[in-house]
Image (tube, rainbow, N blue to C red):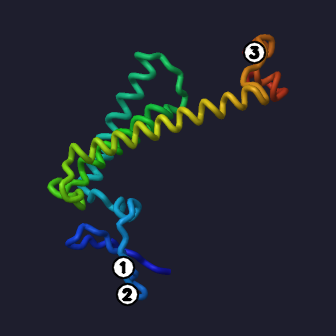
């Protein structure tokens, strides 16, 4: 099994060294640059901050917006992902213990790029989710009839009751 470790050289390129064969391969791709962007203290701050933000986002969605998100999916994964993505741009700075930003790139520049990535990802996901749902609605339908809804989906779709007679 090959073990790789990343080394940043003077030209701000990441060099991946294969310890088993002592060969090196210099890469400047985004995937190589993203490895261990922030070190343990920065990662700890990102994790604790995201946890706190997710907790309050969950409370806001449930209590203020009164949305029944039984697994808190958006509050945890959506809000936590956005928080982590933005803070990664902050803690990538070498002054905060990260591997450092590219030459001439400030923390604000990097956070702006991270924010753009968030917007593009959310837009892409929303667009294709909408298209897929529209196709499914035309193909097999997404709603049950009002009568089926009154009878209960456990009975109509699964031919069993979900609850005892209460």
Which label is found at residue 22?
Answer: 2
| Mark 1 or mark 2, earlier in chain | 1
Residue drawn at the location 35% of the way across and 75% of the way down:
26
Q: Residue furthest front?
A: 104
Question: Horizontally, is 46 left or right of 156 in the view?
Answer: left
Q: Secondary structure at mark 2?
A: loop
| Mark 1 or mark 3, earlier in chain | 1
Neighbor class of circle 3 (other Cα within 10 Å; few <14, some 14-19, many 20+) is: few
Residue drawn at the location 44% of the way across and 17% of the way down:
65
Percent position (x, y) of residue 37?
A: 30, 58
User: Is mark 1 in CB contact (under 8 Å) with mark 2?
Assistant: yes
Q: Nearer the viewer, residue 140 or 62?
A: 140
Q: Which residue is mark 3?
A: 149
Quarter of the picture holding the C terminus:
top right
Percent position (x, y) of residue 51?
A: 35, 39
| Mark 2 or mark 3, earlier in chain | 2
Labels in figure, total: 3
Q: Nearer the viewer, residue 123 or 16?
A: 123
Q: Secondary structure at mark 1?
A: strand
Q: CA distance from mark 2 to mark 3?
A: 65 Å
Q: Nearer the viewer, residue 40 or 155?
A: 40
Q: Secondary structure at mark 3?
A: helix
Q: Which residue is mark 1?
A: 17
Residue drawn at the location 36% of the way across and 40% of the way down:
116
Vertical arrangement, residue 132 with respect to residue 106, above or below: above
Query: Quadrant of residue 81 in the image?
Result: top left
Residue drawn at the location 20% of the way across and 54% of the way down:
93
Q: CA distance from mark 1 to mark 3?
A: 60 Å
Q: Residue furthest left?
A: 95
Q: CA distance from mark 1 to mark 2?
A: 7 Å
């Amino acid at each position: 099994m090959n073990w790789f470790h990343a080394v940043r050289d003077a030209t701000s390129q990441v060099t991946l060294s294969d310890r088993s064969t002592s060969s090196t391969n210099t890469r400047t791709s985004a995937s190589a640059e993203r490895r261990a962007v922030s070190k343990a203290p920065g990662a700890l701050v990102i994790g604790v901050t995201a946890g706190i933000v997710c907790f309050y986002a969950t409370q806001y969605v449930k209590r203020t917006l009164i949305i029944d998100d039984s697994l808190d999916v958006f509050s945890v994964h959506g809000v936590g992902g956005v928080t982590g993505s933005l803070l990664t741009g902050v803690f990538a700075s070498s002054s905060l213990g990260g591997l450092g930003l590219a030459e001439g790139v400030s923390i604000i520049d990097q956070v702006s790029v991270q924010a753009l990535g968030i917007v593009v990802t959310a837009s892409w996901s929303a667009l294709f989710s909408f298209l897929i749902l529209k196709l499914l609605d035309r193909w097999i339908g997404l709603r049950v009839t009002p009568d089926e809804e009154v009878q209960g989906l456990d009975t109509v779709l699964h031919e069993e009751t979900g609850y005892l007679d209460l």
